[in-house]
Image: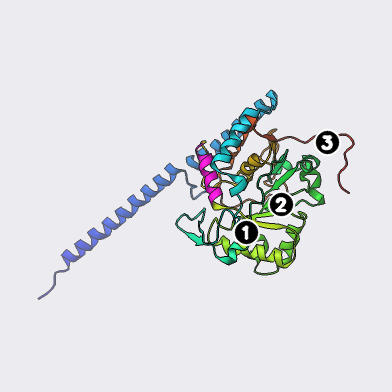
Amino acid sequence: MLWNKAPFKLLLCAALCCFIAGTVLASFYITFQYRKKGFRSPHGTIQRGTATTMCQSCREEDAVRRRVLQLEARGWERREESYQKLRSGLSRDCRGTSEAVMSQENTPLGSKVIYDGEKHRHIEIDQKIFSTFPQESPVGNVTFASCAVIGNGGILLDSGCGEEIDRADFVVRCNLPPVDGRYYSDVGNKTDLVTANPSILLEKFAALSERRRPFVDCVSRYGVGTMLALPAFSYGRNTPLSLRALYTLQDFGTPARPVFLNPRYLGSLARFWRARGLRALRLSTGLMVTSLALELCSSVRLYGFWPFDHGPDGSPLRHHYYDDQRSPTSVHAMPAEFSQLLGLHGQGVLRIQLRKCQREQGERGPA
């Protein structure tokens, strides 16, 4: 019996036509969605969504610049009531003086510590880790008259703020920045507390798995007794890395004091600022140490805090005062954080230095 091929050919042709039609329709749909959401076209032109995002960033920067000019025209005045109100809130809700740093007092042996960035994960504090904690908080019942918190923004370059910074009673720096002779006149060199993000240890010092001397030399430049704050319990992967940093400094006899930031304190800080309208995946190091300074100090002044590519006067800026490298991704809401800090400046709670510093008569920097 011969098989009739005509129906089979007809069916095959119909299927092929359906496939072609479906492919064409799918292409039209994908193209439409890409254009609708503003993705870059194959020819490199920027569609509506990207342009809108860029314009929105420009508008945010312009709005902040106008706000800064208004605040400068009004002049800064300390308002004790506003300062005491915020400080009391931080002390009540976050307790930085006793909780910011892991200690044997606030984290007993056998405690289960939940990672700040991995809420589903915890670690039990065994004797080895417990022995690395100071007996009590190193920033305990002490109030400093003046604190300087130093960000790394390009706005610090050519600011001439070094001597003013070094006059503060307590100086905090972020992420192991350079403070050598080349930068002294702008950033000073006094350092009481400096932080080190895990990314710095990974990228700059090869996770301390190779030569460790460069890391030791880097930390040693901050002087005797400087506290090095490490986020050992933000993520599980950071615990062994932070312990390697601590053991390295101990093995080389470095005079710095490594300490671990307390994830309970960081969680409290996140809730504190969220209740005040700040929405961010994670708080930046700058906002963390500024919050701590507001508990520790009667007067707080910020330097190097400016999240934009152009200064208040519109002049172009490098990303950092020491380089123009940017992180490929960011989990921090820097403009939103700066807006919060600018609000505190306007309330007289703290002061943000955004212009060049005036050098006092008769003062001389170090040789």
Q: CA distance from mark 2 to mark 3?
A: 23 Å
* Dominant secondary structure, magenta: helix
Q: Which mark is residue 359?
A: 3
Specify start and end residues of the magenta stretch as a single range: 264-275
Residue at coordinates 56% horizontally, 37% vertically from top-left? 89
- As displayed, is residue 320 above or below residue 351? below
Q: CA distance from mark 1 to mark 3?
A: 41 Å
Q: Nearer the viewer, mark 1 or mark 3?
A: 1
Q: Looking at the rendering, which quadrant does residue 273 occupy?
A: top right
Q: Quadrant of the N terminus?
A: bottom left
Residue at coordinates 59% horizontally, 32% vertically from top-left? 85
- The image position of residue 110, as x and y in percent, is 52, 62
Q: Residues within 10 Å of mark 2 (few under 14, many from 20)?
A: many
Residue at coordinates 63% horizontally, 62% vertically from top-left? 132
Q: Judge whether residue 209 is colored magenta.
A: no
Residue at coordinates 85% horizontally, 34% vertically from top-left? 360
Out of 135 and 102, give the one closest to the viewer.
135
Q: Nearer the viewer, mark 2 or mark 1?
A: 1
Out of 66 and 34, give the one closest to the viewer.
66
Q: Which mark is residue 177?
A: 2
- As displayed, is residue 100 above or below residue 59? below
Coloring applied to the structure: rainbow
Mark found first going from the N terminus, 2 or 3: 2
Mark found first going from the N terminus, 1 or 3: 1
Residue that mark 1 sits on: 133
Q: CA distance from mark 2 to mark 1?
A: 25 Å
- The image position of residue 104, as x and y in percent, is 60, 57
Mark 1: which amino acid? Answer: Phe
Mark 1 residue element: loop
